[in-house]
Amino acid sequence: EGYSMKKETKEEFRQLIEERIKNRERVGFFNSIKTKIVFLVFVVVILTAVICLIPSIPKAYMFAALLLFLIAAYFLIAMLVDPIIRISRNVGAMADMDFRDDGVLLGKKKDEVGVMARALIRMRKEMKTTIEKIRTGSGELYDAAQSMNKSASQTAESVEQVDKAISEIAQGA
């Protein structure tokens, strides 16, 4: 037998999904990581071409400028990739059922990483809430089972006493 949702629950779920789709975040063109990397490569290529076209600049300076641009590009790309690595670590921790807030505040970024970070923060909160509800419900279920067990024991004792009383009456008759 499969699990089926109640009609009200299905409707609430549908409304929740529609609301999230309507409110999903969009990333502006200039806030995109892809745009930033393409722009960075474009700038490095243009600056290198300009330096190479100036005949009065010695080749050693051209090489040094190219090396400097590549080092700058490396660090800028690292700045763009580092937040993605941190988010990946957060997702891995959550997969291991570790829902602690690690203090990574990437949710303020305006690019795709910020969108992922805010979604991850929301998901972490929802998971914590869900786990707490399950924990509470589990405790209540345990208490109810203990109460039923106690009631069943008392009922069994009462049945034994009634059976004993009836047996005594039957023997005396």
Image: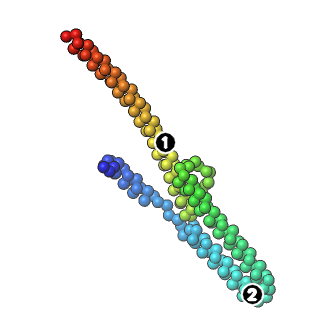
89 w.r.t. 77: above or below? above
Sequence-wise first label, 2 or 1: 2
* Residue kind at label 2, given as amino acid type: Ile
- In the rendered image, residue 3, in percent from the top left (x then y), is placed at 33, 49
* Disc number lying in front (2 or 1): 1
Can residue 107 be seen here? The reply is no
* Residue kind at label 1, given as amino acid type: Glu
151 w.r.t. 120: above or below? above
Q: Quadrant of the C terminus?
A: top left
* Category of crowding for the residue at label 1, using alpha-carbon neighbours closer than 10 angstroms: few (below 14), some (14–19), many (at least 20): few
Q: Which residue is mark 2?
A: 54
Occupied quadrant, residue 50: bottom right
Extreme residue in the top direction: 172
Residue at figure coordinates x 77%, y 79% from the top left: 64
Instruction: Assign a secondary structure to mark 1.
Output: helix
- In the rendered image, residue 8, in percent from the top left (x then y), is placed at 32, 47
* Category of crowding for the residue at label 2, using alpha-carbon neighbours closer than 10 angstroms: few (below 14), some (14–19), many (at least 20): few
